[in-house]
Amino acid sequence: MSTFTETHGILLQLVSRFLIPEVFENKDTGPVPAKILSAISYIQLNLHRDLSVSYLAKRANLHTDYFSRLFYQHTGERPVRYIHEKRIERAQYLMVTTQMTYAEIATETGFENVFYFSKIFKKITGMSPGNYKKQMDLVNF
């Protein structure tokens, strides 16, 4: 049963990514530099850690402002916004596929506390974590 729930959660997230108009925009900015791809990969693998733009820039051996401009140029998003979105995506997945508390999810996704997690969750999704969970429970019913 947990495999079904996990698969269902992944599919819901995947489908929801295609329902926003920004996905259909063509952002042909040429090949993405290896340093930006490396940063994206590092972010995805380390969402639970403290991820600052200055740290990511230092890892890429770039000035913070230049790193941010380059990141924006090739992803269409500022690094902090990108990190928040990836953390919230992971949080949504955990909310649908586990019985973790919001505090546990906040910690697992790199937020310093549940209040900040809730604030960013609402900013990204337009709804509170509780409302999101209720909506997903209705869909899964």
Image (tube, grey):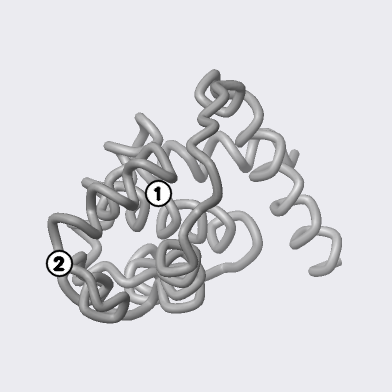
Q: Earlier in the sequence, mark 1 or mark 2?
A: 2
Q: For the residues carrying marks 1 and 2, which lies nearer the camera in this image?
A: 2
Indicate the position of residue 90 as horizontal and vertical percent values.
51, 60
Identified by mark 2, the residue type is His
- Residues at marks 1 and 2, CA–CA distance in whole angstroms: 23 Å
Label 2 belongs to which residue?
Answer: 63
Q: Which mark is residue 35?
A: none
Indicate the position of residue 104 as horizontal and vertical percent values.
39, 74
Residue 16 in which image quadrant: top right
Is 25 placed left or right of 112 in the picture?
right
Quarter of the image containing the N terminus? bottom right
Q: What element carries label 1?
A: helix
Is 57 placed left or right of 90 in the picture?
left
Indicate the position of residue 60 as horizontal and vertical percent values.
31, 75
Crowding near pointer 2: few (<14 within 10 Å), some, many (20+)?
few
Residue at 55% x, 49% y is: 31
Residue at 51% x, 30% y is: 27
Identified by mark 1, the residue type is Glu
Residue at 33% x, 75% y is: 107
Q: Which mark is residue 85?
A: 1
Residue 139 in which image quadrant: top right
Indicate the position of residue 76 as horizontal and vertical percent values.
39, 37
Quarter of the image containing the C terminus? top right
Q: Is mark 2 on a helix, strand or loop?
A: loop
Placement of 124 over or under 109, stated as above or below: above
CB within 8 Å, label 1 to label 2 = no
